Amino acid sequence: MLKEDRPRMISTMNNLKTVLLLGALFGLVVWVGSYWGTGGMLVAGVLATVMNFGAWFASDKIAIAAMRGRQVDETTAPDLVRMVARLAERANLPMPRVYVCPQDAPNAFATGRNPKHAAVAVTRGALQLLAPEELEGVMAHELAHVKNRDTLTSTIAATVAGLFAMLSNIMMYSFMLGGNRRDGAHPLVLLGTVLLGSIGAALIRAMISRSREFVADADGARIAGSAHGLMSALQKLDTYAKRIPMRNPNPAMNNLFIVEPFMGRTLTNLFATHPPTAARVAALQQQARAIAGGR
């Protein structure tokens, strides 16, 4: 195998991993459904689907409003907008809307239900912190998310994970109303099944998000034409994210950002939406060596 083919193989493996993890999520639904029954599963599934796909359809408006983003153009932020336009053309994407958010915490994100309705945003802190090559790597990473339709993938995972939260609520109200048994099943068995399913779904959803970050890193480096800017940016962003808290009103948005806000060394890292930055940088270093070796 040629060295320059290895990064593409790694991206392919991460895409396959995403498919397998989504399959595992739906497998959890089948397993829990075998205990719960079709009635509760159907109600929970409809509610979760409506809520999450409604959020997906308006994802650009919701995320930008939550971060108080201000749309910019060639008059208000010429360098940034021209950079995004150049990268979007290189990625064969429509020009997304570009926003600057007032937060001092350095970060960036992409959102939108499809490439035609996409938006990319960067915080004021990131614009002040990053050198042009680093910012280009970050914007290329976000455009890779747009190209790969990762908002849709995240919504599917969130819908299945949200199904278990809905089931938990249905079960709670069912107990309160005295309907605590179904076909002879002990209520503690049902409760335990739903709780295990909820934990499993949350873990799998986090794993899906982490696999998409590796793919966006690799594809973003290819869009930018070099992995070095993104590598340097990730190291800077990781360092400053731990010093400057993100004034983000909705922690459920954490998976959108290029580095995860509110990081800490706890067991909740099992549910982290991003891989460790050191692992991301190592993967990009391997990609950079492969590209250099192929020249």
Image (cartoon, rainbow, N blue to C red):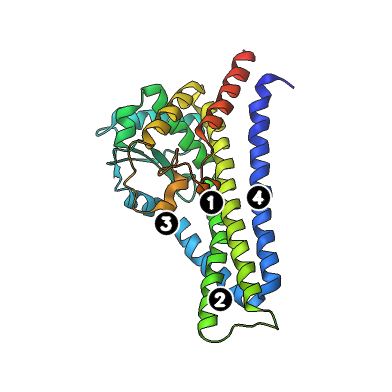
The local crowd at label 1, few if under 14, some if 14 to 19, many if 20 or more residues have their Cα within 10 Å, is: some
Name the spot of residue 189 as percent of width and height, x first: 66, 73
Residue carrying label 2: 171
Residue carrying label 3: 58
Which of the two discs, 2 and 1, labels the residue nearer the N terminus? 1
Q: Is residue 67 visible?
A: yes
Front residue of this view, candidates 71 and 74: 71
Mark 3 vs mark 1, foreground winner is 1
Q: CA distance from mark 2 to mark 3?
A: 30 Å
| Vertical position of residue 115 compared to residue 196: above or below | above
Kindly state the secondary structure of the residue where label 2 is placed: helix
Q: Which three-letter amino acid code belongs to the residue tagged 1?
A: Ser
Kindly state the secondary structure of the residue where label 1 is placed: helix
Residue that protrudes farthest toward the bottom in the picture? 178
* The N terminus, quarter of image: top right
Q: Residue at 68% across / 37% down in the picture? A: 13
Answer whether labels 2 and 4 touch (C-beta < 8 Å).
Answer: no
Front residue of this view, candidates 195 and 39: 195
Which of the two discs, 1 and 4, labels the residue nearer the N terminus? 4
Mark 1 vs mark 4, foreground winner is 4
Residue carrying label 1: 154
Residue carrying label 4: 21
The local crowd at label 4, few if under 14, some if 14 to 19, many if 20 or more residues have their Cα within 10 Å, is: many
Q: Which three-letter amino acid code belongs to the residue tagged 3?
A: Ala
Q: Residue at 49% across / 29% down in the picture? A: 90
